[in-house]
Image: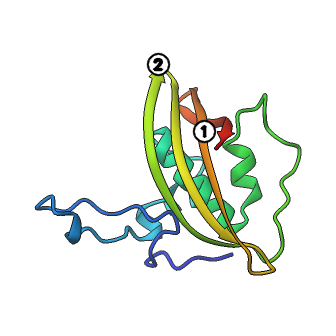
Amino acid sequence: MPFDPHASCPCGRLAASAEGRARDRAPLAYAGCCGRYLDHFSTCPAPDAESLMRSRYTAFVREDAAYLRATWAPAQRPASIEFDPGTRWLGLEVRAHRSTGGDRAEVEFVARQRDAGGRAHRLHETSRFVRAEGRWFYVDGDLR
């Protein structure tokens, strides 16, 4: 699914404010946020676990199974990824992110979605990530 590179990125990341005021922060454009990782995977890996998690959320919005599989740790990577027809992703909130030592990190997030029947759902997860050969990969997560 093509995205307008100038539209707000689905992950909701906000630009830094020159004055540091929260109210002055605007959503980053797709091209300057997750788009650079999804559209240029081979040359532009996500620089940290939070950026990878955000780009994976955007990949779910776009139904980009190839990106999701490529960013899954090989030992846990599923053979295929199926998307629920009619699912609409409504937003992402990153609650916490932290290094757990060396090339490991965790990101806690809440992703909101609405299924084809109109029912709303929240996915609250603490995800684990590992960096190998200069790239971050999703390993697994604990649902809350």
In the current view of this chain or complex, which residue is farthest to the right? 79
Disc 2/disc 1 C-alpha distance (Å) = 15 Å
Badge number at residue 127: 1
Q: Quadrant of residue 139?
A: top right
Element type where label 2 sits in the image: strand
Does residue 135 show up?
Answer: yes
**Left or right of residue 133: residue 22:** left
Nearest to the observer: residue 64 or residue 127: 127
- Residue at figure coordinates x 41%, y 63% from the top left: 32
Is the C terminus in the top left, top right, bottom left or bottom right quadrant? Answer: top right
Residue 57 sits above or below residue 130 on the image? below
**Left or right of residue 106: residue 117:** right
The colour scheme applied to this rendered structure is rainbow
- Residue at figure coordinates x 15%, y 58% from the top left: 20
Amino acid at circle 1: Ser
Residue 22 sits above or below residue 135 on the image? below
The residue singled out by tag 2 in the image is 101
Residue 111 sits above or below residue 78 on the image? below
In the current view of this chain or complex, which residue is farthest to the left? 19
Nearest to the observer: residue 15 or residue 37: 15
* Mark 1 crowd level (few <14, some 14–19, many ≥20, 10 Å Cα): many
**Left or right of residue 127: residue 49:** left
Where's residue 2, x and y in %?
A: 63, 77
Badge number at residue 42: none
Where's residue 38, x and y in %?
A: 59, 58
- Residue at figure coordinates x 80%, y 78% from the top left: 116
- Residue at figure coordinates x 56%, y 35% from the top left: 135
Amino acid at circle 2: Gly
Where's residue 119, x and y in %?
A: 74, 75
Element type where label 1 sits in the image: strand
In the rendered structure, which disc, 2 or 1, sits on the residue that comes first in sequence? 2
